Image (tube, rainbow, N blue to C red):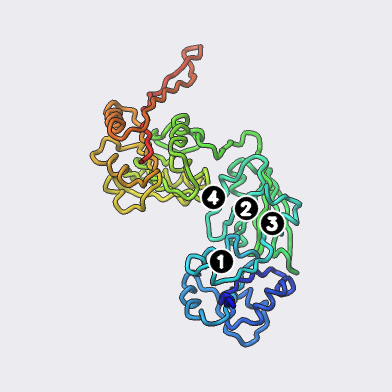
Amino acid sequence: MTALPWLTVVGIGEDGLDGLSEAALRAITAAEVLVGGARHLAMVPDAGCERLVWPSPFDSMVDELRKRKRLRVVVLASGDPMLFGVVPVLLRHFDLSEMTVLPGLSAFTLACARLGWARAWVEGLTLHGRPVDLLHPAVQPGARILALSSDGTTPAKAAALLRARGYGPSRMVVLEHMGGPRERRVEATADTLPDGPFADLNTIAIECVAAPGAPLLARVPGLPDDAFRHDGQITKREVRAVTLAALAPVPGQTLWDVGAGCGSVAIEWLRTHPKCNAVAVEHRADRLALIADNAAALGVPNLRVVEGRAPDALADLAPPDAVFVGGGLTAPGVAEACWNALPTGGRFVANAVTLEGEAVLIALHRRLGGSLTQVAVSRAAAVGGFTGWQPMRPVVQFAAIKP
């Protein structure tokens, strides 16, 4: 007979025990150790078993759980513990075979039921303990967004972000304590939403409406150059789109953006998917601030910024899946260090606008194979009283996949 797992995770809502299944109630009744936040533990009458309150940070609880592997342990979590919840954290330390998961209704499920929204067409994200800037990529005309709040101040911060983006007419619904006796709903536009007070336990629903003239910041690579703060050191829009196509962003993979300038390539890599990772390496201190500001303004505050010159600044970085060299290409050892750091299947892309940089790329092409492409772009500009083509400096791009 197979032994039952020692660890059970129960998703519990604002309705407490009344909303639990029979299996969840049996698990709680049989528990020798009950773990949860103070709010969750207060929902369960004290039957004499050991009780442990979540610490902060949560990872410090792992050792306490390990000490109790011979006991019946029940972890109480909000709603669906698989949705930005505790189970993914536990699975970093325990095997799935050691636990039973009994999920409840998620805040997203409840919100969709309240609003009549089809869950499949709603983007869900969490702002709990995270910057509100994470909303930026999801803010698009007609988009519907659900966001878990960090606390009662989050709705006002989200409304301010929407107004700053030109989405003041967007409908906002703040849903507090869903499923319980204290449930409350506040509805307004981003322009008119009050600063509060709101309960700390709330979920924000946003139906995006762009005001006339609001900039369109699509997730497809090739944002307008003026979407970034820069000092002229920027991979231009048309070339950036070609560059991102060659880098081929993949969810969960990491990009090194070497000689990052204002960080435009790394930022567009991150915007393609929330699981993408990127490191921007730049030696100029004034540009580091530009990179950080651009990352926040475009919704990817998780961009890691490293101050230093390649190749020395690359030595302690985790290996990349793709590398872009936009600056410092002619410095000795940069291209070699980047290529050597890549795993099999890793992508290497480098751009050059000078003859010296082009010579480096030609040499790499002869040695490594791959492709060489010249990208020549002209933009219409005023010529006296007429309009003519204003050519930008041609860019030579080398791209290769490591065999």
Instruction: Estimate the x, y position of residue 58 in percent, counting from the top left.
Output: 50, 70
Q: Earlier in the sequence, mark 3 or mark 1?
A: 1
The residue carrying mark 1 is 86
On residue 224, the disc is none
Q: Secondary structure at mark 2?
A: strand
Residue 6 seen anywhere in this rendered image of the structure: yes
On residue 133, the disc is 4
Which amino acid, mark 3? Val
Which amino acid, mark 1? Val
Q: Mark 3 to mark 2: distance in Å?
A: 14 Å
Q: Mark 2 to mark 1: distance in Å?
A: 17 Å
Q: Nearer the viewer, mark 3 or mark 2?
A: 2
Which amino acid, mark 4? Asp
Q: Nearer the viewer, mark 2 or mark 1?
A: 1
Instruction: Estimate the x, y position of residue 294 in percent, counting from the top left.
Output: 47, 43
In the rendered structure, are the residues bearing label 3 and label 4 in contact, judged by CB atoms less than 8 Å apart? no
